[in-house]
Amino acid sequence: MTHAMLGHVDRIAQSNRSDKVRVKSALGLAIVFAIENLCVMAPISALSHLTLTAPNRRLHEESLNFYSRLGFKAISQETDDVWLHLFPPPSAKHGAGFTLHLIVDNVPTFDESTFQRKWKKTADSLTDDKVGYASWGCFVVDDVQAIQAELDKTNYPYKVSSLQYSQLWTSQRVTSHSHITGPASETPQTEAVALQTYDPIGNLLTFTNRASPFGTGKVDAVAVSQTSLASIATVDGIPTASTDEGKPRQRKRIGILTSGGDSSGMNAAVRSITRVALQRGCVPFAIYEGYQGLVDGGNYIKRLGWEDVRSLLAVGGTSIGTARCADFRTREGRLKAVYNLITNGIDALVVIGGDGSLTGADMLRAEWKGLVDELVALGKIKEDECQHLREDLTIVGMVGSIDNDMSSTDITIGAVTSLHRICEAVDNLTSTALSHQRAFVVEVMGRHCGWLGLMAGIAVGADWVFLPERPPPLDDARYGDDWETEMCDTIKKYRSRGNRKSLVIVCEGAIDRQLNPIKADYVQKVLTERLHLDTRVTCLGHVQRGGTPCAYDRFLATVQGVEAVEAVLRSKPGVPAPMIGISHNKITAVPLMEAVQLTHAVGEAIKKKDFARAMELRDPSFTAIYDAFLETTIFSQGKNQPGPDGQRLRIGIIHTGAPAGGMNAATRTVARLCLNRGHVPIGIRNGFSGLIRDEVALLKWNDTVGWQVRGGSELGTNRDHPQPLPGGPKIAPKGDGEFVDLGLIAYHMQKHDIQALLIVGGFEAYTAQLTLTHARSVFPAFCIPMIQLPATVSNNVPGTDYSIGSDTALNAIVEACDRIKLSANASRKRVFVVEVQGGNCGYLATLGGLTTGATTVYIPEEGVNIDKLQSDIRHLCKRYTEEDRWGIPNEGRVILRSEMASSTYTTDVISNILRAEGKGLFDSRTAVLGHLQQGGVPSPLDRIRATHLAVNCVNWLEKAAAAAGEALAHTPVAGASSVYTKQPSHSCIIGIVGAETVYTPVEDILKEADVKARRGKDQWWMGFNRLIRVLSKYEYSADVVDTDTVDLLRNRDPSRTMPKHSHSESDDR
């Protein structure tokens, strides 16, 4: 517990608002610190940090050693500027410890010999039998004797006092720096013990095992101890490597720069880097207008504070600007850039941009020492100014590119948002195309990479796509170089089947096999002249770059920003600059120039007409999704002919559980792929209850037209569940679901000769398949290959990182919370408690909180209790008080609560508590999003994942059926159909784990599942709760702010005078 009793107060704040107070120590030395709720001889709560000023460097060094011996850890250290922190013990449920800021202020008139005499005289006063006299700090520690032992090692003066049965017992031991007066008395087991001593600059300290042992007021404990706490980077779910928190380091000054083409999500990255850098003791700078601002310097380089990056998550593009800079390509321009970096003390750059921007940064790093030496030789900077910056410049790259054209990372910042813009535009074009039976040729970006074109083609159900990496024609043997005829033949087949529209996607860098460009206008001409279609061209252009970032780009930019700061902190001279990427759902740091070289290799392979090599250089999922597109679209009803009857399967497709975005896309893909391969797709309507009512129909090609973009479930779904056999899994239907008799299900599956079953759904689908698998010993109809395709907004199915539908729900939450925050901002002092779905799984609340900038989240895995509510209320009160004090417009805030987080602390109860406790500071309202999270048009990611997984499901069913047929041929079973298997491995869940597609038997998944809570036991996203709190300022203690520096990134006009920054603690907030 941080608690202090103050004397010699020059000025005291009489209100409950934090203030800056000047206090004199017993020796008359001034101490400046920030406190809250200050009153004379009373406890101080919420003491965030304290600045101690030493009159010369020797006493500064002695004070540093003194506090280090007592357990304070140096979290940031420069020559005369050290930040120390006393961390809470692991056992402490609450408290952030205590921070000291130790600086030097050389006093010319300071007489050290006089000071030492006064110090000794004051220390000798500890022999007086007085208790409770003024001290600036009283710390609650686990073990007072440990402090006593540390002071004994250096013969340091102290006094131990205790209080028992309201009687004072005192054991004194006084030493000086030169002699020992006697052995320490043992401290008996009493109710309260306090140790008092002076630090080297004359400040009286008290260490006690009980909060306010000699005071009368009751205070809440904020424990501190001599143990250190791991950095945020070591927390599970925050995918970074940690630095040694016990080792003092130079405070890094990090420049943040966005360059090249803008992409949505860059602002989220700037926000994340800034706030995590501040939390980690670094000093962030914004470099406006990209490399041009770096070259021009001056007002284009601005120190950032916590509030400067508020409200950036929902803003597209980059608020610090970007520009392509010709000057930086010259050595003279880079010389100016180095000068500006050194004059601002910046020793690290985080560059957010494409391959060109990252190459420029690496070039600057390579030339750094030579350019610094040149500046010294020219006399533009002094040698002592740049001594600690001379050897190396730390560079960290983050890829912001809508093309997703960077190698060594699965996705780049901005690519998914751009895909959203394309799909929104093409979805809107579809209604016009259907009305007039038109063909639309849509040009999308992608000069050297066809990712946008391919993904958009799958997501909107395009008839043809033109990609730079895979030029047409696709069937070389049949068409040679005549891609025009191949395209027209394919589209003609669709039209003959009754298709009223035609969609062709053309990447801007599309070429044929002879490297001739293919333009949208030429494609229009071919379709008009050969097929006589009413064809229109739409060039989306820069519409693809703009707009509000989608949920995934906010998430990606935020977690990569955390890793970028950690990469800066662990950087060493001579180590290649890292590029932050994502691979297999893990944040990675790979050598920057290796990634750039691999990216350029794709372009070189295309120039050499080595298109196979170009496809190999893309990530494996690109090739897999391209093959899925071909099989479900291009080759449909064409190249692949139905196989013999013995190889044909009657595949049942059933939806169960709650609807989720992407269910229809998966069904469309399975149906068309089955028809293409000669199988029979059987649609089962309205779940298992529909099956026993014979609501079964064969799916034809045209039955699924338009399903790719439809939300909900076209087949129909409910929570009705197969009734488990005695001794089977203990499962109860959720909500309004009812049990369906297993015998009836088996009878109707036999009746319709279903030889393989695809179940699309969430946790109900898992338990339903588990029930059917367990009943194989009784009902032979269930002895067939079965696979579940996870589809639920809750993302609670074990065995997969993502379920289709969860991204759609997450984007619905983000969109709703953005609008709610607008209302909250307009009302200024308002906190919305937003209830989201998810059942007993907190995925939506956690990822929603991270991507909407929520203050905190309440999830079932952690629950809600009064301690957490009190902590959150204190935090909200502090934040609104700070904003009032600093003159910053109040910000509306959002708290996300999962619907099953607590049965006691409901959404309304939490809101009412907040309203009551925040009276006078803020108001509170509720918003229950409900079923709007399930509906609407599926997000592009859900459509793509659904298509990819559906193709793999059909492939797996074919292989399982073939294996079952072979086993049956060797070991016949009386009365068995052509497909018969009881192998546990032939009843699986398909999942996405990292970037891999995995198949896990449902019985094996049972070990990973919490059936009662309806979720997996190991959640990969749980660690992000800590990051939400870090980004909401829960763990950042500096709260003294120069209001002139808070301009919310609006002041970048070089004609205006930028505010000057001092080197006080107010700049490091």
Image (cartoon, grey):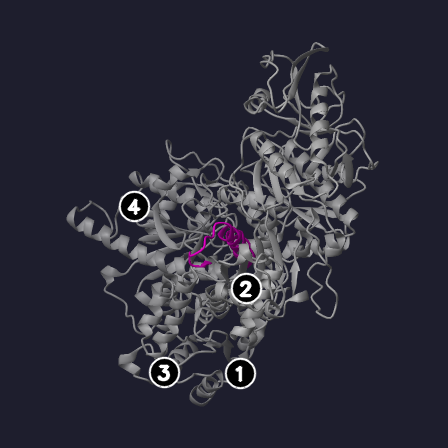
For the residue marked with disc 2, what is the amino acid? Thr
Give the Cα distance between marks 1 and 4.
51 Å
Q: Which residue is mark 1?
A: 536
Query: Along the polypeptide, which appears first: circle 1 or circle 4?
Result: 1
> Which marked residue is nearer to the observer: mark 3 or mark 4?
3
How far apart are labels 3 and 4 at the CA level? 44 Å
> Residue 134 location in percent, x, y?
76, 26
Which of the two marks, 3 or 2, is nearer to us in this view?
A: 2
Residue type indicated by callout 1: Arg
Is 4 above or below relative to 474? Answer: above
Q: Sort mark 3 into few (<14), some (14-19) or many (20+) by Cα contacts within 10 Å.
A: some
Which callout, 2 or 4, points to the residue nearer the camera?
A: 2
Highlighted range, magenta: 552-579
Can residue 302 be seen here?
yes
Q: For mark 3, what is the residue?
A: 483
Residue matched to label 2: 417
Sequence-earlier tag: 1 or 3: 3
What is the quadrant of the N terminus in the image? Answer: top right
Q: Which of marks 4 and 2 precedes in the sequence?
A: 2
> Would you say the residues marked 1 and 3 are in contact, meaning their CB atoms lie under 8 Å apart?
no
Q: Please state which amino acid type lies under the numbered disc 4.
A: Ser
